């Protein structure tokens, strides 16, 4: 049985789950939240622990909490390091990259898209990119931790893809990160995701309005 992702038809928190599912070769279907009645049915069925999405149905479980979902997949498919030290380092880098990603996901939700983008470029980009560039300079494997692709690599890749979306020339100042992004993007499964129908478009004002409706349905 295929995995099944329930979320709205946009990137948001669901995009990280879509990316890792592709990276490990898990086929999945999607259900998009369309109206308050749909959300109400899920809540009444007890499917939405903490009343949150995304929800991933996989291996007989209905999982919520984005980071928990990603860690479950990473553990199962050997994307979480070999030793306790590696696992901890992956956690550190993953969580840092997630913080960076969230800066992009919040664009258009706080102020205007233009104002929020400007804030990310002036404050988040110079905070995170030099750190990540330095991390890559310290590894000879081409991956952030150890010799294999990890969930930390995918989180950093996602953050760099957002950089490309919003600030196309910014990675020219970070050659290690640019090479890393290009190399991981060319991996067959990841390339299939980036060029396929299940990757969502860059966030628009229309997407934000719909996202706010979904949140209202979840918490009403």
Image (tube, rainbow, N blue to C red):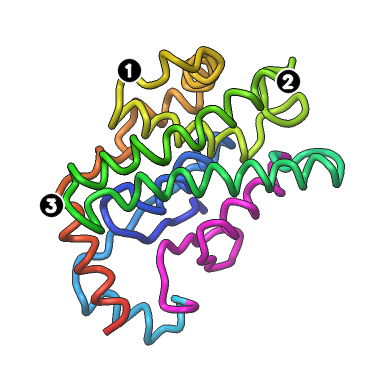
Q: Quadrant of residue 200?
A: top left
Please name the residue that numbered disc 1 is placed on. 169
Q: In the rendered structure, are the residues bearing label 1 and label 3 in contact, judged by CB atoms less than 8 Å apart?
A: no
Q: Residues within 10 Å of mark 2 (few under 14, many from 20)?
A: few
Cα–Cα span, label 3 and label 2: 41 Å
Q: Earlier in the sequence, mark 3 or mark 2?
A: 2
Q: Which mark is residue 196?
A: none
Cα–Cα span, label 1 and label 2: 24 Å
Residue 65 colored in magenta in the image: yes
Cα–Cα span, label 1 and label 3: 26 Å
Q: Quadrant of residue 172?
A: top left
Look at the picture and state if 103 lies above or below 157: below
Spot the residue most to the left.
206
Q: Position of residue 209 (x, y in %)?
A: 15, 60
Please name the residue that numbered disc 2 is placed on. 139
Look at the picture and state if 34 lies above or below 89: below
Q: Which residues are magenta?
A: 49-78
Q: How many marks?
A: 3
Q: Which element carries disc 2, helix, strand or loop? A: loop
Q: Earlier in the sequence, mark 1 or mark 3?
A: 1
Q: Position of residue 97 (x, y in %)?
A: 54, 42
Horizontal side, residue 51 vs residue 60: left or right: left
Q: Nearer the viewer, residue 116 or 6?
A: 116
Of circles 1 and 3, the one toward us is: 1
Please name the residue that numbered disc 3 is placed on. 206
Q: Residues within 10 Å of mark 3 (few under 14, many from 20)?
A: few
């Amino acid at each position: 049985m295929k995995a099944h992702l329930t979320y709205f038809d946009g990137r948001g928190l669901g995009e990280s789950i879509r990316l890792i599912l592709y990276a490990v070769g898990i086929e999945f279907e999607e259900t998009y939240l369309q109206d308050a009645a749909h959300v109400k049915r899920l809540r009444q069925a007890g499917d939405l622990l903490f009343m949150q999405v995304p929800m991933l149905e996989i291996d007989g479980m209905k999982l919520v909490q984005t980071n928990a979902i990603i860690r479950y997949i990473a553990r199962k498919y050997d994307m979480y390091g070999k030793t306790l030290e590696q696992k901890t380092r992956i956690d550190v880098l993953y969580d840092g990259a997630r913080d960076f990603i969230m800066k992009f996901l919040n664009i258009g939700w706080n102020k205007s898209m233009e104002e929020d983008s400007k804030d990310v470029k002036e404050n988040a980009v110079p905070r995170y990119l030099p750190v990540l560039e330095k991390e890559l300079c310290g590894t000879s494997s081409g991956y952030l931790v150890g010799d294999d692709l990890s969930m930390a690599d995918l989180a950093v890749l996602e953050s760099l893809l957002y950089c490309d979306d919003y600030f196309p020339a910014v990675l020219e100042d970070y050659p290690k990160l640019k090479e890393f992004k290009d190399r991981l993007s060319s991996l067959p499964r990841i390339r299939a995701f980036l060029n396929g129908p299940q990757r969502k478009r860059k966030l628009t004002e229309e997407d934000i309005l719909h996202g706010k409706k979904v949140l209202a349905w979840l918490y009403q």
